[in-house]
């Protein structure tokens, strides 16, 4: 890939990536429901791209969360449309549709195994929040997963920054925005401008999304 990221000086990853091998790409993956995608998702994806000097970061919506308490989401078509609107003006960000296309529960190990098999020339950097790091031992086939990807942790001051697993820690500006918060605001008739891209705000209004959530 011809694009070359420019490292950000004031926010610096704590570990340098291995020197890039010839003909191998380095791609970040940010998974989630994206119900809806908001500014925090976009800032994290863009900051990791720049700080680690990746070739691209893909936002990967899940079809169905593997969590014990699965979160109800709107149809995947709407979530994909909002992701398209949110990322179309950033050439570094793209969408990975693997889990949506496969359907069913989205176990990270199964997804990444398929992506690695389909793209043997790519090294993957899987982005997770600092609050998720302590749960890594419970992830499905975590030991096998560690052989497929490198985890990137978004540092959060209230959570430990240690793990039995190798983590590349990245600093990202703290933004206390969640999809749940946005959905609640929309249902209550409150403004959500600046919490997510204007194009996504307009799409939600046109499709009348999140107005009748229980």
Image (cartoon, helix red, strand yellow):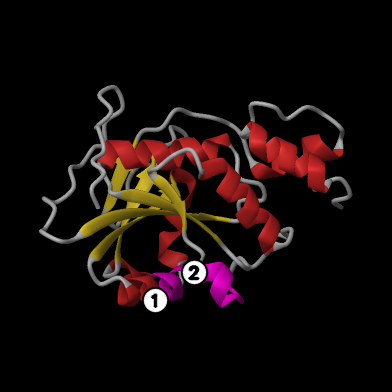
Provide the residue designation for mark 1: 114
Q: Specify the quadrant of the image occupied by residue 4.
A: top left
Q: Is residue 140 above or below residue 38?
A: below
Q: Is residue 208 above or below residue 190?
A: below
- Inspect the magenta stretch and tell me whether residue 5 lies in it: no
- Secondary structure, mark 2, is helix
Residue 67 position, x and y percent, is: 60, 66
Prevalent SS, magenta region = helix
Q: Specify the quadrant of the image occupied by residue 182.
A: top right
Q: Is residue 128 visible?
A: yes
Q: Left or right of 51: which side holds 60?
A: right
Q: Left or right of 204: which side holds 14?
A: left
Q: Left or right of 159: which side holds 199?
A: right
Residue 209 position, x and y percent, is: 80, 48
Evaluate if marks 1 and 2 touch, with contact meaning CB atoms under 8 Å apart. yes
Residue 57 position, x and y percent, is: 38, 49
Q: Residue at x 53, y 69 (%)?
A: 99
Provide the residue designation for mark 2: 98
Q: Residues within 10 Å of mark 1 (few under 14, many from 20)?
A: few
Res. 46 mark: none
């Amino acid at each position: 890939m011809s694009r070359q990221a420019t490292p950000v000086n004031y926010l610096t990853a704590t570990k340098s990536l291995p020197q890039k091998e010839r003909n191998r790409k380095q791609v970040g993956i940010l998974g989630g429901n994206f119900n809806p995608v908001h500014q925090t998702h976009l800032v994290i994806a863009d900051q990791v791209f720049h700080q680690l000097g990746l070739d691209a970061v893909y936002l990967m919506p899940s079809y169905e969360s593997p969590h014990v308490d699965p979160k109800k989401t709107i149809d995947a078509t709407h979530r994909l449309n909002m992701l398209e609107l949110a990322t179309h003006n950033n050439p570094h960000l793209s969408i990975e549709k693997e889990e949506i296309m496969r359907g069913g529960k989205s176990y990270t190990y199964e997804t990444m195994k398929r992506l690695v098999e389909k793209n043997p020339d790519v090294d993957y950097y899987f982005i997770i929040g600092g609050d998720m790091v302590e749960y890594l031992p419970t992830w499905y086939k975590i030991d096998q997963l560690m052989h497929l990807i490198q985890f990137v942790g978004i540092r959060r001051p209230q959570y430990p920054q240690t793990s039995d697993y190798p983590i590349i820690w990245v600093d990202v500006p703290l933004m206390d925005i969640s999809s749940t918060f946005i959905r609640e605001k929309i249902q209550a008739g409150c403004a959500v401008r600046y919490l997510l891209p204007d194009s996504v705000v307009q799409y939600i209004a046109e499709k009348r999304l999140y107005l009748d959530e229980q």
